[in-house]
Image (spheres, rainbow, N blue to C red):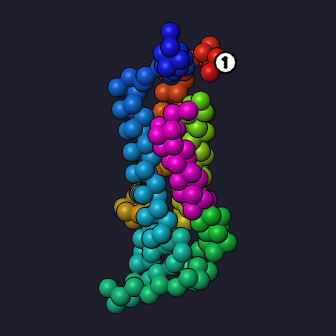
Amino acid sequence: MTAIGAQAQRLLVHRRPQKSFFETLIRSLIILCVAIAVVLSSISVCDGRWLFARGQLFGLWHFCTVSNGTVLKCVTDLSLANVEGLSVGMIPIRSMVAFAVVVAIFGLELLMVSQVCEDANARRKWSMGSVLILCSFLLSATGVLSFSILVKDHLTFTGFALTYWCEFVAAFLFFLNGISGLHINSLTHPRNRAGKI
């Protein structure tokens, strides 16, 4: 056997098994859904107007009142809303939902890198990305729930703005895709083979 034939034989032995079409499709869909969730969450955090009730607009960054039926008067001093604890309570809420976007971006990056660069650490990168997506869910859901508790006296189901629902849907997508990412990793790489990799 020639040296080239021996090298080719060695490459075939060390080659990783090919992924099935459905595994690649599912992983691609998870990445796509996480990207959509990151966009929704980013829009929600940047706009920040989450609740409209009784002529007042409550947001992460502004408090607005409607005067003369159409003109919005917005201020950044949330203590003017006369809601107990709003100005202080909004600081950790803002931090949580903004940090959720940052963590989700890093998680998304790890998910994509694990699919593009299929090295020995690809499985570990995918798991780490899925865990970061679940952390984004915890941060995002805590922020949404805390906001609802903070303005509980003004809550109406129809009062929630579209950006609030964007954050709610993003949190839900973070949860589904984080769990799905961990699950597909455990299905395609059982624990008994994990030690050999």
Label 1 sits on a secondary structure element that is loop
Q: Residue at x 55, y 44 (%)?
A: 110
Judged from this view, the residue extending furthest toward the bottom is: 68
Q: Pointer 1: what residue?
A: 195
Judged from this view, the residue extending furthest toward the left is: 70
| Residue 25 locus on image (x, y percent) | 36, 32
Give the quarter of the image for residue 80.
Answer: bottom right
The residue nearer to you, when weighing 134 against 19, is: 19
Q: Residue at x 60, y 33 (%)?
A: 121
| Residue 188 locus on image (x, y percent) | 49, 21
77 vs 29: above or below: below
Q: Residue at x 53, y 70 (%)?
A: 60
Q: Which range is magenta?
A: 96-119
User: Do we see residue 25 in this rendering?
Assistant: yes
| Residue 174 locus on image (x, y percent) | 49, 45
Q: Residue at x 35, y 26 (%)?
A: 22
The residue nearer to you, when weighing 36 against 150, is: 36
Viewport quadrant of the C terminus? top right
